[in-house]
Amino acid sequence: MAILSDKWIREQAQQHGMIEPFVEAQRREGVISYGLSSFGYDARVAPEFKIFTNVNSATVDPKSFDAESLVDRETDVCIIPPNSFALARTVEYFRIPEDVLVICLGKSTYARCGIIVNVTPLEPGWEGHVTLEFSNTTPLPAKIYANEGACQFLFLKGNERPEVTYADRAGKYMGQRGVTLPRL
């Protein structure tokens, strides 16, 4: 597997709609950086957040997630309570080629503040807005800035198309728009 460069990412975004909207150069002035980098793409977080609350004393169950455990907020700055988390989504909509796997890493600016960004790999043939999970590991409230960088996507080219892509098996998160909760 080879990691793919800015040239390849730009070509796929501009000619095949792999990333929409696409920011061709990294933007950094006064914001947490986003846009195309040397070997990746720094995606932005949209201003739609679902913040975890334990008001109902629910048990977190990935097989039967209770949406009542989340509070919806549309805001430019999301405040995550201490030792809690929030779900969000990327501004960008991704269309992953059938012979590419995408891995996501959190931005170091957030990591240095105790805020962890988690995303599972984007599988070959998948498309949609990426749901992001921000974990506040600190004992203090933490801020997430909408429309600024949240994480970096790295594109890895496989040696061939897999026998079955995410699209082929009609994966449960295919074509997701907005913040998507766990599905069984």
Image: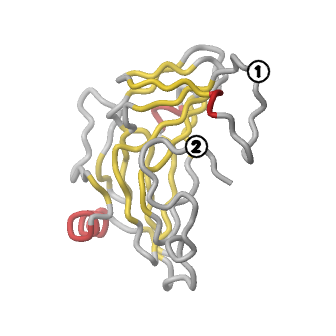
The amino acid type found where label 2 is placed reads Leu
Camera-nearest residue between 133 and 59: 59
Q: Which residue is mark 1?
A: 57
Give residue 38's quadrant in the image.
Answer: bottom left
The amino acid type found where label 1 is placed reads Ser
Name which residue lies at 42% across and 51% down. Answer: 129
Residue 108, percent from left and from top:
48, 37
Q: CA distance from mark 1 to mark 2?
A: 18 Å
Q: Is residue 178 left or right of residue 38?
A: right
Q: Is residue 69 left or right of residue 115?
A: right
Residue 45, percent from left and from top:
39, 38
Depicted 13 relative to depicted 141: above or below? below
Of the numbered discs 1 and 2, the one sitting upstream in the chain is 1
Depicted 125 relative to depicted 65: above or below? below
Indicate which disc residue 181 carries.
Answer: 2
Q: Is residue 82 left or right of residue 15?
A: right
Q: Outermost residue, top direction?
A: 140
Residue 152, percent from left and from top:
43, 49
Under circle 1, the secondary element is loop
Name which residue lies at 43% across and 39% down. Answer: 150
Mark 1 is surrounded, within 10 Å at the Cα level, by few (under 14), some (14 to 19) or many (20 or more) other residues, namely: few
Name which residue lies at 24% across and 40% down. Answer: 27
The quadrant of the rendering that contains the C terminus is: bottom right
Give residue 53's quadrant in the image.
Answer: top right
Residue 175, percent from left and from top:
44, 59
Q: Is residue 104 left or right of residue 46?
A: right
Under circle 2, the secondary element is loop
Depicted 173 relative to depicted 151: above or below? below
How many marks can you see?
Answer: 2
Name which residue lies at 52% across and 45% down. Answer: 180
